Amino acid sequence: MAGARHPGKKKAAPSAVDELRREAEERLDRLSADAVDAASPVPEDIAAVVHDLRVHQIELEMQNQELRRAQLELQASREKYFELFDLAPVGYLTLSDESIVRDANLTAARLLGVERQQLVEKPFTAFIFAPDQDVYYRHQRKLEQTGEPQACELRLRRVGGEAGGEAEVGAEAAPGHFWAHLESRPQRATDNETLSSWVTFTDVDAQVAAADEIRRLNAELEKRVVTRTAELVAVTKELEAFAYSASHDLRAPLRAIDGFSAMVMEDAADALGPEDVRHLERVRAAAQRMGCLIDDLLGLSRVARRDLYRERIDVSALAREVADELLAEHEARVVEVVIAPDMAADADPRLVRVILHNLLDNAWKFTAKHEAARVEVGVTDADGERALFVRDDGAGFDPDYAEHLFGAFQRMHTAEEFEGDGIGLAMVQRLVNRHGGTAWAESQVEQGATFFFTLPSEK
């Protein structure tokens, strides 16, 4: 019967309806317990209708309570959203298809130096610095053509900083415009034709100024490099001229000293005593040593100026060639040579050969007082970098003086102990430096020495 009286009623999900009806009936029972007069009989059908009406009334009241609670929650969410929207660290704008500002947050208004109501319904192009209008038009055209997010950098007008613009009393004067990073995202309307956009922008004045300063410093640095390079070329030419002069002008008097001393020793041999002969021999030896020093200096200068041609080289094979030459030159020596296999590097083979020759020759020299010697050429890891080394078990040196080891004419031993002129290690360091590497040594007196060097690949 009830179903006949409500033919148009739409049923909700059974579980929700049953629960709602149960709560409503419980409330109705409590309300009608005192209100219904037991002595006044009510027809059964009328009582059922009244009962249903009261249930529906209570259902509506409960639904209204739920609706009011949902409205309060929605209002709180909206307030929270707008608080986040307004206080965001970037400017937010909603633009129409004609770039009219439909909405803006407080940050956008602050960056542009206006009140929010002065920004809304205004064309966004009015706030773009005139020389950058074309940048924005190209940005918008690309946004419309691709329908994908776009970004650009342009200058925006800061109204409060312009001549005649309004600014807060006591506030520092703002510049008339600032660099901004602009990002736009397309928003299609329901008709799928009208295109609006969601725009964010940030003040990047400081970043742009820093980039300009870096470019200025780089240009200045390049200019200085060109100037210093020209100065270095001039100094190098002067050194070459001096070396040429030294090689010719100094050799003549040295040859004369050596030659005339030999003539005196030969022509006046009967008149000279043993002490006189020793003095003349020392003069000749000094002249000859001076000639050798000049040759070494010129050789050091030439090697340092040679062009560098890198290629993949077999360091093990080069070390073996040099070692074989030294073994043949010093046949009477007993030297065990150990060379690690498959050592390779990207370097100039001629210069690397000079490096190995100087280091191995040193090893031969400083093991000369040992009946049997051991020389090793190998590779190791030095703080994550691949380093080659030459190790011997010879005289070694005091590690406190290691910093002077690679200087020209710097010697750890006297000429009476070990012959040499102190040029070899200076040449090693210069050639290693030419390859962009480093050279160093480790040693203890009478415990041998190890010379390390790196040959990094060209970057």
Image (spheres, helix red, strand yellow):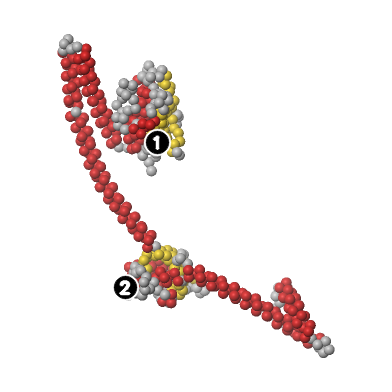
Residue at left 21%, top 12%? 274
Q: Residues within 10 Å of mark 2 (few under 14, many from 20)?
A: few
In the picture, the disc for residue 241 is: none
Q: Residues within 10 Å of mark 1 (few under 14, many from 20)?
A: many
Question: Is residue 384 visible in this depiction of the protein?
Answer: yes
Task: Indicate the secondary structure of the residue bearing disc 1.
Answer: loop
Residue at left 45%, top 71%? 106
Q: Is residue 407 above or below residue 2?
A: above
Residue 373 in picture, x, y percent from top left: 42, 21
Residue at left 62%, top 75%? 69
Pointer 1 with pointer 2, Cβ within 8 A: no
Q: Which residue is disc 1 drawn over?
A: 454
- Which residue is farthest top? 270
Q: Which residue is disc 2 drawn over?
A: 163
- Which residue is farthest bottom? 40
Mark sitting earlier along the chain (1/2): 2
Quarter of the image with the C terminus in it: top left
Residue 85 in picture, x, y percent from top left: 49, 69
Residue 15 lies in quadrant: bottom right
Residue 329 in picture, x, y percent from top left: 35, 20
Mark 1 or 2: the one toward you? 2
